[in-house]
Image (tube, rainbow, N blue to C red):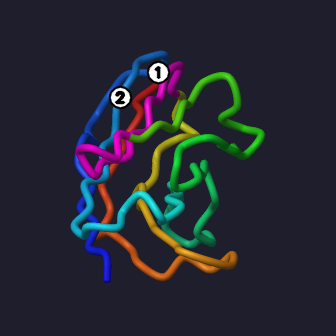
Amino acid sequence: QVQLVESGGGLVQTGGSLRLSCAASGRTFSSYGVGWLRQTPGKEREFVAHITGPGDSTSYTDSVKGRFTISRDNAKNTVYLQMNGLNPEDTAVYYCAARRTGLKYMYWGQGTQVTVSS
């Protein structure tokens, strides 16, 4: 069982940066892949980025490549999402989620709001 808590969201102007954190409970956190996903009202939840348990592989949706960086510190049971060059289209509630095997995320945080003003 893994419990996830996001933090770091807020209001930022276009072109600004934020760093989201996802703090996890559990002694085997390093065996879980973790993703960041985002959702805006009326839209499907969208994949943003993923990092493997050891942190040796990452993937991103095309719209954030070159702007967002996902990383993790397994000693601190924390995954980060560094977001640079933010634009209003990045406005959403951002969730972190974890999975041990397969493609389905099994554990979710409560979400953190990111708002980018123009």
Q: Secondary structure at mark 2?
A: strand
Q: Position of residue 10 (x, y in %)?
A: 26, 39
Q: Which residue is mark 1?
A: 14
Query: Would you say residue 78 sits in the magenta stretch?
Result: yes
C-beta proximity under 8 Å, tags 2 and 1: no
Residue at (47% x, 45% y) in the render? 91
Compare residues 66 and 12 and report the one nearer the observer: 66
Disc number placed over residue 18 in the picture, else none? 2
Q: Percent x, y for residue 100?
A: 53, 74
Of 108 and 18, nearer the camera is 108
The structure residue drawn at horizontal position 48% and vertical position 82%, both measured from the top left corner, is: 106
Q: Which quadrant is the N terminus positioned in?
A: bottom left
* The magenta stretch spans residue 105: no
Residue 59 located left or right of residue 10: right
Residue in the picture at 25% in, 54% down = 23
**Looking at the image, which is closer to me, 73 or 18?**
73
Q: Quadrant of residue 45?
A: bottom right
Q: Residue flagged by tag 1: what amino acid is it?
A: Thr
Residue at the image point whose x is 63% and y is 59% from the top:
47
Q: Secondary structure at mark 1?
A: loop
Q: Which one is in front in this view, the residue at disc 2 or the one at disc 1?
A: 2
Amino acid type assigned to the residue bearing label 2 in the image: Leu
Q: How many marks?
A: 2
Residue 99's tag is: none
Residue stretch rendered in magenta on the structure: 73-86
